[in-house]
Each structure stands twice: as C-alpha cells, then as structure tokens.
C-alpha cells in the first residue's frame, strides 16, 4: 500500500480550491439568436401573413381577378389552416406547462 504524503494531499486541495475560485465557464450564448418571445412573435406574424395571403387568393379567385387556379387557392388555404392549428397546439402546450408550473408546491 502506498502511503499518501501530506504534501500530495495539500497540493490536491490547493488545486481543487483554485478550480473553485475561477469562475465557471459556460457555453457562450449566441447574441444573434432570437429570444423566445421574439421567435414566438415572428411565428405568429408568419401565420398571419399566410392566412392573409390565402384570404386574398380566395377573394381574387371568387371575383375572377386572380390568375390563381382552384388548386393553388385550396393549397394556400390548407397551408394557412395547418399553420394556425400548429400555433394553436403550441399555445395549448405552453398553457398546460404554465399551469403545471403554477400548481407546483413551493
């Protein structure tokens, strides 16, 4: 069995103490990455734009002023519907998560 000298123990303690004294380096967060609120806002604006485009295509097709075919109008309408449903589902998940957090005992 190898006896451990007090000098070895002291050097290990000093090394650990030095590690604790230095500030922990964390992974830098990219400054150009959008924050959650901004990302949510951009997504909602995108969904709104998709819905407005589909609405204008429908109106143009009904009035006969648009060159869009029925297939293009229906595809735009389905895209708008699908994007709205996706945002609504994300909202529902966020509300559920918020409610769970609020019901946690402190």
Image (tube, rainbow, N blue to C red):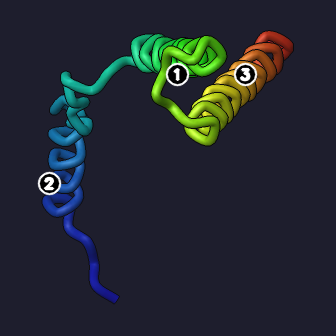
The answer to which of 74 and 30 lies nearer the viewer is: 74
- Which corner quadrant of the image does residue 69 belong to? top right
- Give residue 106's position: percent from left, percent from top: 78, 11
Front position among marks 2 and 3: 3
Which residue corresponds to mark 3?
A: 88
Cα–Cα span, label 2 and label 3: 59 Å
Label number found at residue 71:
none
In the image, what residue occupies the spot 61% across and 39% down? 75
Mark 2: few/some/many CA within 10 Å (<14, 14-19, 20+): few
- Give residue 62's position: percent from left, percent from top: 66, 16
Query: Would you say 15 lies left or right of 46 here?
Result: left
In the image, what residue occupies the spot 26% across and 36% down? 26
Front position among marks 1 and 2: 1
- Which corner quadrant of the image does residue 9 belong to? bottom left
Query: Is residue 91 at all visible to an observer of this figure?
Result: yes
In contact (CB < 8 Å): disc 2 and disc 3: no
Front position among marks 3 and 1: 1
Cα–Cα span, label 3 and label 1: 15 Å
The answer to which of 69 and 10 lies nearer the viewer is: 69
Which residue corresponds to mark 2?
A: 11
Instruction: Decide which of tag 2 and tag 3 comes sooner along the chain.
Output: 2
Instruction: Decide which of tag 3 and tag 1 comes sooner along the chain.
Output: 1
Which residue corresponds to mark 1?
A: 50
């Amino acid at each position: 069995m190898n006896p451990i000298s007090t000098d070895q123990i002291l050097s290990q303690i000093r090394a650990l103490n030095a590690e604790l004294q230095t500030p922990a380096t964390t992974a830098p967060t990219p400054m150009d990455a959008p924050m959650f609120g901004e990302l949510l806002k951009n997504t909602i604006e995108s969904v709104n734009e998709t819905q407005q485009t589909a609405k204008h295509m429908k109106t143009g097709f009904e009035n006969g002023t648009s060159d869009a075919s029925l297939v293009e109008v229906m595809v735009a309408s389905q895209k708008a519907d699908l994007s709205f449903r996706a945002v609504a589902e994300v909202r529902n998940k966020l509300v559920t998560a918020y409610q769970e957090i609020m019901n946690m005992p402190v």
